[in-house]
Image (tube, rainbow, N blue to C red):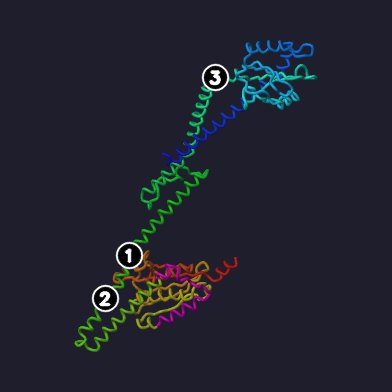
Amino acid sequence: MLKTLYTRLALGLFLLLLLVALLYGFISFYSLKQYNASVNQEIHRNLARNLVADRNLVSGGELDKSAMEELFALYMTINPSIEIYLLDLDGTIQSYSADPAKIKRNRVSLEPIMTLLSDPGQYPVLGDDPRSHERQKVFSVTPVPSMAEPEGYLYVVLRGEEYDAAETMARGGQLVALSAWALLVSLVVVMIAGLLVFRLLTGRLTRLTRLVEDFEAGDMSQHPEQTWRSQRPAVKDEIDYLGVTFDNMAQRIASQIEQLREKDAQRRQLVAQVSHDLRTPLASMQGYLEILKLRRDRLSREEQERFLQIALLEGYRLSQLVDELFELAALEAREKQPDPECFPLAELVHDVVQKHMPRADEQSIVLSVGGNPDIPRAFADLAMTERVLDNLIGNAIAYTPENGRVSVRFEAANGRPGVSVRDSGPGIAVADLPHIFEPFYRGEAGGDRRHAGLGLAIARRIMTLQGGAIGAENNADGGAVFSISLPAADARNGADRE
């Protein structure tokens, strides 16, 4: 029941209001009591002196005992709320108007009497109540028979026992009921108002909680249809900021889950493709070696040499594939990072072309270099760039038919050095172009050839790590064109200086 924020806030408000009501009641009761005492003492400040003067308690400079007794009897009848005491100079009670059986003190303290006589405007001043050992009450006092020659004090307790009884009865009856009703109505009104305010304040939190629950209960890979931003376009406070943050988080989670699914699908496809590509040379090696073992006596020396050569070539192919797998894995995990330096790209291209020239001559392919060699110096990893050029030129030679041409040209675009490799082969199928750099992607090339392996995937990863770019397209005259661009050394140095 107390799990919701609204319920907890409502309970907290109720307890807070109850505490405030109790504290207010205590303070009000105490303040009202002090106020009544002050008013009562102020009104009756001269009561004792007036009693002495009006009732002729002093005759011939002496206190008239008989007049005093008449005064006691009179006020016991007409005003039972006051009690009159005659004190000596030590505060000892000489006579009184109260019931003798209820008198608990023989004397009262003179300190509050002296305080009130010295400063009549100071109130409330509380004096001892002869009916109690602990209770104090407001009083009126005057020296008798005179201020000049006091022989004692006329001590009048203004709120006597009869007053206390009447006050207790009133407080226990109508006053208590009225106070209780007032307190109850106040609590109910404030509670209702507080609950309405809390409902307004927590309503948005409830909607945000519902959005989170719907997102959690549904497929988190799907972007939520209802978002906080669609309900409240403007960010006005912390709750709105929390809602917008949840929207952004939900979108990121959905995108990340979608990417994970794509990565998982790619991983499954890659495992299947790797298994196929590793199985093919292994099966070929195993087949030729088994033939050699079983039919060695019936095979000529030339056949044995040919079978061994085929098995050895399949082993080289398998070794190259495994090396490419490790190289791509290291690049994807960023274990292999480029070490960029400034170098002339034209010289590197000439060196790579010379390396592939013998293979091109064997296949009667014309391998040429053209373009303007005065391109900006490159800022990249020399060995990695050479690895990319080896792959592009090697693929171009592999897919170019006999007596064909492979052209390597220097290019510069937007101040960045670049190289393009054109071949006169069958080109790339239009459907394959978007996927040509994916690992182990297999697509038709001219209808009878396939692009497979990891070379182009490694090339793209290398160019990405170096801040370069790589692309592929079909030449209008036939064949494929692969191009790369690298960061320029001058631009990089300028950025470093900034």
Of all residues, the one furthest to the right in this rendering is: 148
Could you tell me residue 376's position as x and y percent?
Answer: 53, 72
Q: Is residue 147 magenta?
A: no
**Residue 463 visible to an observer of this rendering:** yes
284 up-or-down from 273: above or below:
below
The numbered mark, 2 or 3, whose residue comes first in the sequence reads: 3
User: Mark 2–mark 3 contact, CB under 8 Å?
Assistant: no
Label 1: element kind: helix
Disc 3 to disc 1, C-alpha distance = 93 Å
Residue 457 falls in which quadrant of the image?
bottom left
Magenta span: predominant SS is helix
Q: Left or right of 353: which side holds 343?
A: right
**Residue 43 visible to an observer of this rendering:** no
Residue 210 falls in which quadrant of the image?
top left
224 up-or-down from 123: above or below:
below
49 up-or-down from 428: above or below:
above
The residue type indicated by label 1 comes to: Gln
Q: Which residues are magenta?
A: 328-357
The numbered mark, 3 or 1, whose residue comes first in the sequence reads: 3
Query: Which quadrant: the N terminus?
Result: top left
User: Mark 1–mark 2 contact, CB under 8 Å?
Assistant: no
Image depth: mark 2 or mark 3 in front: 3
